[in-house]
Image (cartoon, rainbow, N blue to C red):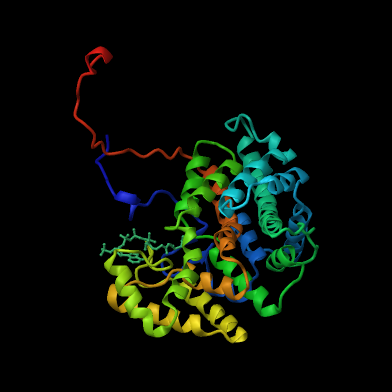
């Protein structure tokens, strides 16, 4: 057996190769710096880049958008299921079940290679994954909007073709598209959330795929991992903390108490970024713009004081969830939608990794260091 390497939480371990993104030297998707993508592209272009490897030409983008529009309508059975749910179910749980159900109503999925090791099956798996990815991009957004409306006693809205992905989401939520600044701010958040190499949910999707399971299962698993507050769930905790602090003068007192109790400040810290997260810096600008437009800059003032305090006292920097939690609040979105919105975006990254895992698959099966009882005999039941 090779020499043992042990790193709790796999910290610092290179667990595979990827050509999709890197966090080395600033986040890049397929070679493009994240700041340039956030400045010059729309989410759909980024999703295409992740899934197909290159930015689309205008024609490729139009065709991609058309395919998304064609896939947006939900199966009636899924809407009936959403209607039947008891109140108060967490949105991420609903998304997880919905993705699992969507597989049953995807006729193309039924021909998912039953023998993925047969000749030609690899190419079919890759093509199928991209097709499923497009469906999930469209349908997870429709599903979230439909569930949101049903929870408020409103009927789900049919999609309106020709809108951008971000505008479409707003339309399906509220029946109207907000102003350009709001749509673009949401669009940029989707670009920034779309991909982040071997984060916990993506790694989960790759582990599932490495057993030659299907993309729906990989996305269901990834949703489960994303839900946790150490990963995607952090953005929902930002506004409650800012409200609890209440004013810039109270920042030090509240944070001192939290840190003394060893409480984590959600939206701060990162396993890889130890000197700041570029994505957070980009999205903070958009959060500030929206706050100014709304004339509601109190939360930005408090947020800035929190950032200063944690940098000075703990050398902790905000991650993307910190500005995202405020930005979605300024967009008028209720908190329970924040982590599912992260999922709507990250599904592009997950599926790109599923494709890549297929392209050079090796079962992901690490070893464990045993720390249980030493060798001992089994005592028969009568003698225990
Ligand atoms: N608040 C307070 N202290 C913190 C925080 C935080 N958010 N993050 C790290 N620390 C402290 C931690 O207590 C420890 O201190 P000490 O050495 O005194 O015990 C030190 O910093 C190192 O922490 P760690 O747990 O070893 O760091 P990690 O690499 O395991 O943690 C993390 C990464 C993201 C789990 C952690 O920073 C955290 O829990 N953050 C809050 C949750 C959060 O914002 N998650 C979103 C992550 S980014 C979005 C995404 O990609 O999903």
Instruction: Write down the quadrant of residue 155 in the picture.
Output: bottom right
Residue 255: percent from left, percent from top: 34, 74
Q: Quadrant of residue 44?
A: bottom right
Relative to residue 347, is residue 189 depicted above or below? Answer: below
Q: Position of residue 45 (x, y in %)?
A: 65, 65
Residue under the point 78% across and 45% down: 76
| Left or right of 97 on screen, residue 367 | left
Task: Identify whether 270 is placed above or below 78.
Answer: below
Compared across the picture, whether 378 is left or right of 365 comes to: left
Residue closer to the observer: 384 or 329: 384
Using residue 67 as the reference point, say whether residue 333 is left or right of it: left
**Measured along the vertical axis of the image, is residue 222 above or below residue 255?**
above
Question: Which residue is at the front of the view, 57 or 22?
Answer: 22
Residue 184 picture quarter: bottom right
Image x and y of residue 270, in percent: 38, 64
Viewport quadrant of the C terminus? top left
């Amino acid at each position: 057996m090779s020499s043992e390497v042990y790193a709790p939480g796999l910290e610092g371990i290179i667990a595979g190769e990827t050509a999709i993104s890197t966090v080395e030297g600033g986040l890049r998707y397929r070679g493009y710096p994240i700041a340039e993508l956030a400045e010059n592209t729309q989410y759909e272009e980024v999703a295409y880049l992740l899934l197909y490897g290159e930015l689309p030409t205008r024609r490729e983008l139009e065709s991609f958008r058309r395919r998304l529009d064609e896939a947006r309508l939900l199966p009636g059975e899924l809407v009936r299921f959403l209607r039947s749910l008891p109140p108060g179910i967490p949105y991420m749980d609903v998304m997880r079940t919905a993705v699992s159900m969507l597989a049953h109503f995807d006729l193309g999925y039924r021909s998912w290679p039953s023998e993925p090791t047969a000749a030609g099956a690899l190419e079919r798996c890759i093509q199928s994954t991209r097709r499923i990815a497009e469906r999930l991009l469209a349908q997870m957004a429709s599903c979230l909007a439909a569930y949101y409306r049903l929870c408020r006693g409103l009927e789900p809205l049919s999609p309106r073709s020709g809108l951008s992905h971000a505008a479409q989401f707003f339309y399906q939520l509220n029946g109207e598209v907000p102003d350009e600044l709001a749509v673009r701010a949401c669009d940029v958040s989707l670009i920034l959330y779309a991909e982040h190499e071997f984060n916990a949910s993506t790694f989960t999707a790759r582990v599932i795929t490495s057993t030659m399971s299907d993309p729906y299962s990989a996305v269901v698993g990834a949703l489960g991992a994303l839900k946790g507050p150490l990963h995607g769930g952090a953005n929902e905790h930002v506004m409650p903390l800012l409200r609890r602090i209440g004013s810039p003068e109270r920042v030090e007192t509240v944070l001192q108490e939290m840190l003394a109790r060893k409480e984590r400040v959600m939206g701060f810290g990162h396993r890889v970024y130890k000197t700041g997260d570029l994505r957070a810096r980009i999205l903070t600008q958009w959060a500030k713009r929206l706050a100014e437009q709304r004339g509601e800059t109190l939360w930005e003032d408090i947020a800035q004081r929190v950032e200063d305090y944690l940098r000075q006292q703990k050398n902790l920097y905000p991650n993307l969830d910190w500005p995202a939690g405020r930005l979605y609040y300024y967009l008028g979105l209720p908190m329970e939608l924040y982590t599912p919105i992260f999922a709507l975006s990250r599904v592009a990254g997950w599926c790109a990794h599923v494709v890549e895992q297929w392209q050079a698959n090796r079962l992901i099966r690490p070893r464990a260091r045993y720390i249980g009882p030493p060798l001992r005999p089994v005592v028969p039941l009568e003698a225990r």
